[in-house]
Image (cartoon, rainbow, N blue to C red):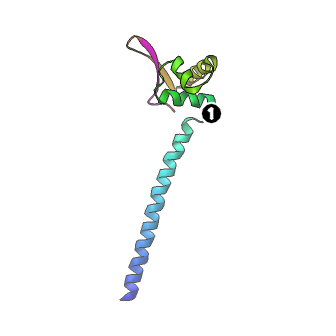
């Protein structure tokens, strides 16, 4: 009778191990896909993208948030639009930057 309880306990331990391993693997995959989003972008490009994600709507706000020179921020914005990370849209008569939902 004791060997049945031991076998049952070992079986539960093995099941718990594999369930935990699967959950951790799925979590790690999700984290890795977030990293791929900015692959190929420079540190400056990533700064500008993060500023826009945080709510910077125009070039002046991007410059304030990032501390980059205006010309550098402008080039980064142009690159991000070309690569499909952000879009320029009209909102209440003003043009504003926004992160594309289907960005890489």
Please tell me which residue is depicted at 60% across the width and 28% down the height of the picture.
45
Highlighted range, magenta: 94-102
Residue 87 among magenta residues? no
Front residue of 67/38: it is 67
Magenta stretch mostly in which secondary structure?
strand
Badge 1 crowding class, 10 Å Cα cut-off, few under 14, some 14 to 19, many 20 or more, is: few
Give above or below for 56 relative to 95. Answer: below
Q: Residue furthest bottom?
A: 1
The quarter of the picture where residue 19 lies is bottom left
Q: Is residue 9 left or right of residue 28?
A: left
Please tell me which residue is depicted at 47% across the width and 51% down the height of the picture.
27
Quarter of the image with the N terminus in it: bottom left
- Per the image, the residue denoted by label 1 is 40
Q: Position of residue 59 (x, y in %)?
A: 53, 18
Secondary element at image label 1 = loop
Please tell me which residue is depicted at 52% across the width and 42% down the height of the picture.
33
Q: Position of residue 72 (x, y in %)?
A: 63, 20
Q: Position of residue 11 (x, y in %)?
A: 42, 74
The quarter of the picture where residue 14 lies is bottom left
């Amino acid at each position: 009778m004791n060997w049945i309880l031991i076998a049952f306990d070992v079986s539960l331990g093995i099941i718990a191990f594999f369930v935990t391993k699967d959950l951790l693997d799925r979590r790690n995959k999700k984290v890795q896909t977030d990293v791929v989003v900015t692959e190929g972008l420079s540190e400056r490009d990533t700064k500008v993208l993060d500023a826009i994600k945080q709510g910077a709507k125009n070039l002046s706000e991007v410059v304030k948030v990032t501390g980059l020179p205006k010309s550098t921020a402008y080039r980064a914005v142009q690159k991000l639009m070309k690569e499909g990370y952000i879009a320029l849209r009209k909102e209440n008569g003003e043009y504003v930057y926004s992160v594309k939902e289907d960005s890489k």
